[in-house]
Image (spheres, grey):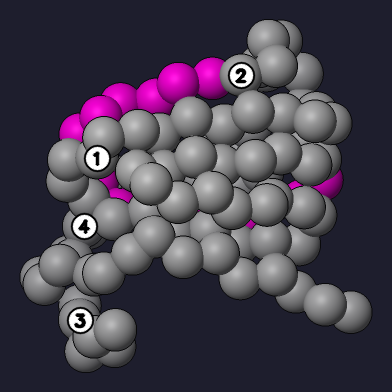
Amino acid sequence: MNHDFIITDITRIVFVDKHEYTTPASTFSNNLSCNEIVFHISGKSKLYYNDEVFDIVPNTVRFLPKGPNSKYEVVRKEAGSCILVCFNTDKPIKGPFVVHNQH
């Protein structure tokens, strides 16, 4: 992964409350206009992104890159809250990836 990039702008920072999505599954854009980094505060879900599947639990950080994708779906096992940051960079960042904080 290229660690040498500059964030050129932050387009959105949003707190998503656990009550915002009332259905068990949500499908999102197949062409992300910005990079997304999400800190999951609570809840449990599965993220289906292209051909990859990620487990999302509390204290998970996920990154999705700007650009086209074949699938972006979140299936919730337990409602949760998160903080979403959308941003652009001077160079593409490879992804997706998920990091679990074990403490």
* Nearer to the camera, 70 or 86: 70
Q: Disc 2 designates what residue?
A: 25
Q: CA distance from mark 2 to mark 3?
A: 33 Å
Of badges 4 and 2, the one in the foreground is 2
Would you call the spot at circle 4 few (<14 residues within 10 Å), some (14-19), or many (20 or more)?
some
- Identify the residue at the far left of this view: 90
For badge 4, the amino acid type reads Asn
Q: Disc 4 designates what residue?
A: 88
Q: Tell me, yes or no, whether the highlighted magenta stretch contains residue 50.
A: no
- Residue contact between numbered discs 3 and 4, judged by CB atoms under 8 Å: no
Q: CA distance from mark 3 to mark 4?
A: 10 Å
Q: Is residue 93 above or below residue 25?
A: below
Q: Earlier in the sequence, mark 4 or mark 2?
A: 2
- Identify the residue at the far front of this view: 51
Q: Disc 1 designates what residue?
A: 69
Residue at 57% over, 31% down: 74
Q: CA distance from mark 3 to mark 1?
A: 22 Å
Would you call the spot at circle 2 few (<14 residues within 10 Å), some (14-19), or many (20 or more)?
some
Q: Position of residue 56 (x, y in %)?
A: 69, 50
Q: Disc 3 designates what residue?
A: 5
Which residue range is magenta in the image?
26-42
For badge 2, the amino acid type reads Ala
For residue 87, say whether it is visible.
Answer: no
Q: Earlier in the sequence, mark 1 or mark 2?
A: 2
Asked which secondary structure carries label 3, the reply is: loop
Number of numbered discs on residues: 4
Looking at the rendering, which quadrant does residue 28 occupy? top left
Looking at the rendering, which quadrant does residue 15 occupy? top right
